[in-house]
Image (cartoon, grey):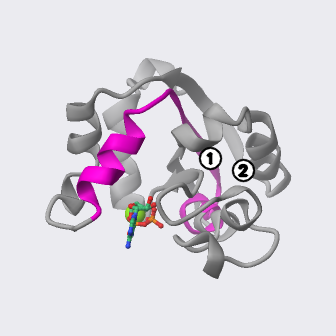
Amino acid sequence: MPIQKTLSIIKPDAVVKNLTGKINARLEDAGLRIIAQKRLQLTRSQAEKFYEVHREKAFFDDLCEHMSSAPVVVQVLCGENAVSKNREIMGATNPANAEIGTIRRDFGQSIEHNVVHGSDSPENADIEIKFFFSQLEIIE
Ligand code: ADP
Ligand code: MG
C-alpha cells in the first residue's frame, strides 16, 4: 500500500468544543501520523480560496462563514493510503449518515458543523498541503 500524505482540518466547531486531542487520538489510533500541525484562524477570503471548487454551491457562503468564524487546526497526516484511510475514519459528510465510531458521527452536529475536513484525492492533498504548509514545516 502506498505511503501518502493528506491534509486534515479540525474545523471551528470542533476547536471551539476543545476536541483537538480527542480527534488526534482517533487519527493516531488508526495508524496515521501527524507530521505537521498548526492552529490558525482563516480570513473569509482565505476560506473562500480554499473552498473555491464549491463557489457555485448553495452552501458556499455558510461554509466560508463557519470556516472563518474561529480558529482551526490544520495538519498533514502521513501513512499507508492516508487519503482514503482518513476519509474512512472521518465518516460521511453528513454526520447523520456517517458510520458509528467515525469522527463525524461521534462529534459532528450537522452537515455544516461536521468537525473535520480531509482531502479527497492524492492530487488534491498535494494542493491543499501546499495551501497551508511550506516544505520546511513538514518533517517526515
Ligand atoms: P467533504 O467535506 O465530506 O469532502 P464536500 O467537499 O462535498 O464534503 O463539502 C465541503 C463541506 O461543505 C462539507 O464538509 C460541509 O461542511 C459543507 N457541505 C457540503 N454539503 C453541504 C450541504 N448540502 N449543506 C451544507 N453544507 C454542506
Ligand atoms: Mg471535500
Taking the spot 57% from the left edge, 69% from the top edge, the residue there is 84
User: Does the Cβ of the disc 2 residue fall within 8 Å of ligand 1?
Assistant: no
The residue lying toward the viewer, choosing from 90 and 41, is 41
Mark 2 to mark 1 CA distance (whole Å): 6 Å
Figure check: 70 above or below 27: above
The residue lying toward the viewer, choosing from 24 and 15, is 15
Indicate the quadrant containing the C terminus: top left, top right, bottom left or bottom right: top right
Q: Earlier in the sequence, mark 2 or mark 1?
A: 2
Q: Is residue 67 part of the magenta span, yes or no?
A: yes
Q: Which mark is residue 78?
A: 1
Q: Is residue 132 part of the magenta span, yes or no?
A: no
Residue 121: tell me if it is visible.
no
Taking the image in four quarters, ligand 1 sits in the one at bottom left
Please state the horizontal and vertical placement of residue 104, each as a whole percent of the image: 66, 62
Q: Helix or strand or loop: what does disc 1 sit on?
A: strand
Indicate the quadrant containing the N terminus: top left, top right, bottom left or bottom right: bottom right
Figure check: 96 above or below 140: below
Which amino acid does the dot numbered 2 rest on?
Leu
| CB contact under 8 Å: marks 2 and 1 | yes
User: Would you say 34 lies left or right of 59 here?
Assistant: right
Q: Quadrant of residue 132?
A: top left
Residue with the most extreme top position: 136
The span shown in magenta is: 59-86
Taking the spot 64% from the left edge, 63% from the top edge, the residue there is 90
Please state the horizontal and vertical placement of residue 138, each as a whole percent of the image: 52, 27
- Residue holding disc 2: 32
Taking the spot 71% from the left edge, 42% from the top edge, the residue there is 33
User: Would you say 131 lies left or right of 105 here?
Assistant: left
Q: Helix or strand or loop: what does disc 2 sit on?
A: loop
